[in-house]
Image (cartoon, rainbow, N blue to C red):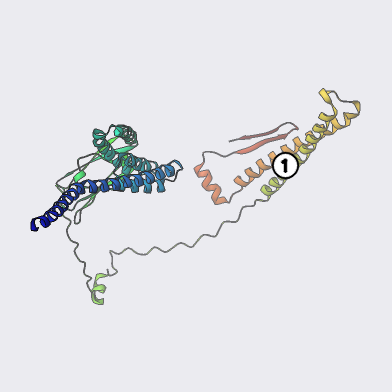
Amino acid sequence: MQQGRDAPRSTVLLSALMASCLILLCWPTTASAGKAARVDKGKAIAQKVYVQGVDHYRAGRLLEALAAFRASYEMVHSPNSHLMIARTLRDRGALVEAYAEYGQVVTEADEAAARDPKYEKASQDARAERSRLRERLTMIIVRVHEPPDDLRVAVGDRVIDRAQWGEPAPVVSGAIVARATSPGRSEQRQEIVALPGAELVVNFDFAAVAPAAPPVPVTAEKVTSDELGRARPSPGADTIPDIPRQPPRAPPPAPDRTWAYVSFGAGAAGLVTFVTFGAINQSAFNDLQRKCPSGHCAPDAASDVDKGRRAQTIANVGFGVALVGATLGCIVLVTNRAPEQRTEEVAHRPGSVALTDLSITPHAVQVGGVF
């Protein structure tokens, strides 16, 4: 009887042992499945954020696109999202930063393409776009002879780290200044013109540059009144006597410009006459064009023709008066100077101009002179 009761108990223990083994065997598979599910979910979220970034990029919202691509790349280090980061930086004008990102994309895409061929296109695109961007930048190679430990080198707005000395560093093309500064030493600087696509070498030499000496404090010495008196020279034979100042000259009389103003007034009246009768002549001409088709006028239009001719003649005379008045006014204004001014001008001028002849006709104005 005792043996019969122990048989069910052994069966129960054996079943429990088998269940435990089964749980232990299935546990890694269950954990792996949960981890794979989390990875797939993370990729799905990263892909969704990447698509949002592409929408922002195509719409020209580059700042939002850059934030989305960086968030997607933080979730899943994909060469595709990294490539879009470089493109967005390039389009925003951050050329130096974009060039560095392109270099990282090339390395990252090559490693990913070795595992999955779908990333070969990202590698090729990154190389091609980086090569085109290189043509817009200038490579600067910094070389320093015997640099101090605390030396700081800056090319334009970019600080070149010590680890990058001797290696090409991209900078934005244009007129830039390269500076090498160290506390206690004189600054060295070079002004360079960085051309797109070029490569320049900037050299600094601190071998012969001695540390700057500390400034010597200047102390003010007290000077007594007796010492000040002894320092003053006493009047004697060696002193230069004062020369009496000449009395000021009386101001010259103002030049008489009456005739200049009269000439300008006559010229202005002639200009008004020219404008007025020119308008009358144009109006008469327009009326005749309407009344005389094909250039044939009726006999009753003769008065309008005479009116237009008279207006044209008067306008021509007015223009001549305006021209002569302006010319004479300028001549009188220039030649009618104070005696002192005329004397200075004659001294600096090889000759003078004299008006000898003036004639006005309805069709021309003639002015003659000698110099």
**Residue 311 left/right relative to 86:** right
Q: Secondary structure at mark 1?
A: helix
The amino acid type, in three-letter code, at marker 1 is Leu
Of residues 160 and 106, which is closer to you in this image?
106
Please report the residue visible at 29 percent of the width from the left and 46 percent of the height from the top. 37
Please report the residue visible at 23 percent of the width from the left and 33 percent of the height from the top. 114
| Residue 20 in the image, given as x and y percentages of width and height | 17, 52
- Does residue 139 show up? no
| Residue 45 in the image, given as x and y percentages of width and height | 35, 47
**Residue 188 left/right relative to 336:** left
In the picture of the structure, the residue carrying the numbered disc 1 is: 271
Of residues 75 and 29, which is closer to you in this image?
29
Please report the residue visible at 73 percent of the width from the left and 31 percent of the height from the top. 363
**Residue 81 left/right relative to 330:** left
| Residue 51 in the image, given as x and y percentages of width and height | 40, 43
How many numbered markers are drawn?
1
